[in-house]
Amino acid sequence: MPRQPTIVGQAVLLVIDIQKSAFMDYKAGIPVMPGYHENMERAKRIVDAAHEADIPIIFFQEIHRRNKIDYGRELDGTEDIHCLEGEPGTPVAKEEMDMRPTDYFIHKRRYSVFFGTETEILLKGLKAKTLIMIGGMTDVCVHYSFADGHQHDYYCRVVGDCVGGTSPEAHKASLNAMEYLQEGAVLSADEIIAAISAHQVAAE
């Protein structure tokens, strides 16, 4: 198959679990790689570019009830209690990311943005073809969301310096796995912003 364009048809930006903990000196219950916080700060450039180009944005928040009934098997591995309802690091980083009333918001109980949510209904309403992903964690929620988006036949793009993993090794391995599924899927912030700008010009 020939390499596909960076953006095909209607793009939608998925801001995956960029929550207050990313901008706080706060133990979130999940290990993070060096540079994670800087990557989350850089992610705002992609939000700004999407707003400028009138690309729909969906913000996702992982959140769990205080009685822990909806964690399932999520705590069987390395992760400790995280994204607990009512904790200071759990809310979406609205101010830091300039989340607007015109943006969309979905909360989720599992890793993938598709699992047990209204995401697929919303994407169909938006006539989405290309999904641009930023946020965390590269090797967990971003990776599983990418794989599900791929299996739903979306063109999936992940901004490699605007996602962060649980370790540098896990971050890199997941980016490699996503690139394996769709060649050209992993891009830098500068590359995706240039693609958004070019796609906007072409549409005018």
Image: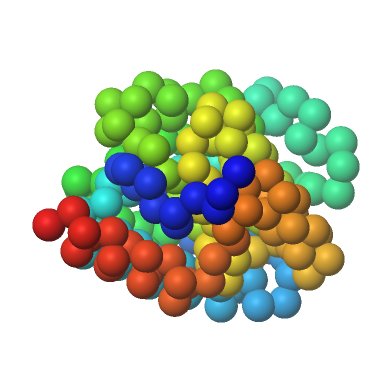
Outermost residue, front direction? 2
Task: In this rendered view, identify the residue nearer to me: 94 or 182.
Answer: 182
For the residue pair 133 and 17, the one nearer the viewer reads as 133
Count of numbered circles in the view: 0
Name the foreground residue: 54 vs 201: 201
Classify residue 102 as left or right of residue 38.
left
Q: Is residue 21 above or below residue 91?
A: below
Residue at 45% x, 45% y: name it. Answer: 131
Q: Is residue 167 left or right of residue 10?
A: right
Q: Is residue 157 visible?
A: yes
Q: Residue furthest left?
A: 204
Residue drawn at point x = 52 percent, y = 46 percent: 156
Residue placed most toward the observer, 202 or 127: 202
Residue 59 x %, y %: 40, 46
Image quadrant containing the N terminus: top right
The quadrant in which the C terminus is found is bottom left
- Can residue 16 be seen here? The reply is no
Residue 180, position in %: x, y? Answer: 72, 50
Q: Residue furthest right?
A: 77
Residue 161 screen position, x and y as percent: 57, 71
Q: Residue at x 55, y 35 (%)?
A: 149
Q: Quadrant of residue 58?
A: top left
Whole-percent x, y for residue 33 in the image: 74, 70
Q: Quadrant of residue 126?
A: top left
